[in-house]
């Protein structure tokens, strides 16, 4: 199993390098930091703009290959360069990465766990009331774009707050500015701010995983090994949990990697709607300001997250399928 995981890890590291390089080359070709200086008053001279862009390694008059070599050399040492304003990209990453990771991890854990549990139970109760209700809920969420889900929850929060007569659900920012309420007070404040955006992300994960897990569970419920387990004396509950569910989870953990890419896109819209200063909202702002290095840094972060999810799915796959452990 360890040889299998090491091989996969090396492959993922190569893919991260390729994805980040492609993101930088595309951003450097499509974005024009020079445009940012055209509307300044007074407008700087072309020589001054060239000098500033050279300082930031963003001058479009310098060959793209030369700019990439300088940028890649800095990245190897852990430096993602400067933003268009001259600030350190690394400093921005330190501030924003934990903001996004909180949302991503919470949304994935809650949404995927809930989706797998509901999907498996819906398969066991096929064509029953629970199956119909979960199917309707899943398809409703799947039919609605992530940004609409986030805004709908925001509107619902306003209605709940009006009915309750107090701010029960918070939907702006990741924390109350200037709050000094001690450790537990601050923690509670952050949890209140985190509830709605986490739910927006978890709903999309629930919808996808519940449908996928239901189908996978139905495929194995009538299998010979499940009937054999029952014939050996196992209870129906034990046979379903130990044999049917474990087998049905194998393709689900593989599918987890692909849904994680969708999750990253959903995080971008959710952060923007709820005014979270994370990596997703930074990506949108960076494209608007022609910030090449920031776009490349966010792309690298997204690639690392997707590949980390892929590696986690490999670990779970190796745990669920004994055949992988001897490969």
Image (cartoon, rainbow, N blue to C red):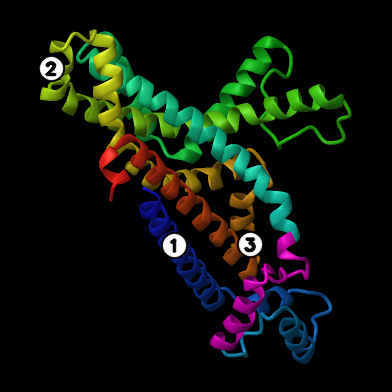
Q: Does the magenta stretch include residue 114?
A: no
Q: Residue 10 carries which label?
A: 1
**Residue 168 position within the rendered picture, expressed as x and y whole percent measured from the top left:** 69, 17
Query: How far is the residue under mark 3 from the one under mark 1?
Result: 30 Å
Q: Is residue 287 left or right of residue 21?
A: right
Asked if 312 appears above or below 175 in the picture, the reply is below
Q: Is residue 202 visible?
A: yes
Q: Where is residue 103 in the image (x, y as percent from the top left)?
A: 59, 38
Tell me the CA gap for discs 3 and 2: 57 Å
Q: Identify the residue position indicated by label 2 in the image.
A: 227
The Cα atoms of the two marked residues, 2 and 1, are separated by 41 Å
**Residue 40 or residue 283, whichever sits in front:** 283
Asked if residue 159 is positioned above or below residue 32 in the image, the reply reads above
Residue 84 drawn at (x, y percent): 72, 70
User: For residue 178, what is the image quadrant?
Assistant: top right
In this rendering, the answer to whether 217 lies above or below 259 is: above
The disc, 3 or 2, on the residue closer to the chain's N-terminal end is 2
Q: Which mark is residue 123?
A: none
Along the horizontal axis of the image, is 180 left or right of 81?
A: right
Is there a contact, CB below 8 Å, between mark 3 and mark 2? Answer: no
Q: What stretch is highlighted in magenta?
A: 64-90
Q: Name the residue under label 3.
A: 286
Find numbered disc 1 in the image and state the secondary structure of the residue it sits on: helix
Helix, strand or loop status at disc 3: helix
- Label 2 vs 1, first from the N-terminus: 1
């Amino acid at each position: 199993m360890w040889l299998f995981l090491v091989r996969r890890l090396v492959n993922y590291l190569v893919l991260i390098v390729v994805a980040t390089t492609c993101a930088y080359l595309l951003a450097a070709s499509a974005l024009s930091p020079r445009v940012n200086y055209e509307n300044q008053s007074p407008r700087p001279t072309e020589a001054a703009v060239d000098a500033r862009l050279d300082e930031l390694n963003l001058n479009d008059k310098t060959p793209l290959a030369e700019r990439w070599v300088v940028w890649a050399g800095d990245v190897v040492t852990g430096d993602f360069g400067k933003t268009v304003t001259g600030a350190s990209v690394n400093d921005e990453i330190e501030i924003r990465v934990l903001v996004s990771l909180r949302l991503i991890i919470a949304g994935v854990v809650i949404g995927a766990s809930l989706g797998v549990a509901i999907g498996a139970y819906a398969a066991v109760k096929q064509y029953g009331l629970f199956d119909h209700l979960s199917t309707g809920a899943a398809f409703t969420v799947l039919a609605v774009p992530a940004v609409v889900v986030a805004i709908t929850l925001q509107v619902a929060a306003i209605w709940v707050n009006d009915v309750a007569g107090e701010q029960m659900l918070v939907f702006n920012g990741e924390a109350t500015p200037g709050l000094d309420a001690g450790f537990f007070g601050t923690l509670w404040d952050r949890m209140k701010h985190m509830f709605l955006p986490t739910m927006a992300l978890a709903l999309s994960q629930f919808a996808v995983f519940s449908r996928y897990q239901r189908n996978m569970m139905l495929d194995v419920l009538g299998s010979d090994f499940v009937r054999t387990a029952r014939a050996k004396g196992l209870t129906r509950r034990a046979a379903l949990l130990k044999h049917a569910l474990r087998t049905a989870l194998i393709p689900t953990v593989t599918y987890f990697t692909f849904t994680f890419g969708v999750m990253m896109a959903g995080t971008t819209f959710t952060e923007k709607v709820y005014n979270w200063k994370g990596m997703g909202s930074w990506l949108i702002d960076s494209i608007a300001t022609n910030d090449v290095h920031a776009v490349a840094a966010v792309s690298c972060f997204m690639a690392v997250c997707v590949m980390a999810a892929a590696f986690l799915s490999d670990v779970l796959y190796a745990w669920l399928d004994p055949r992988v452990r001897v490969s």
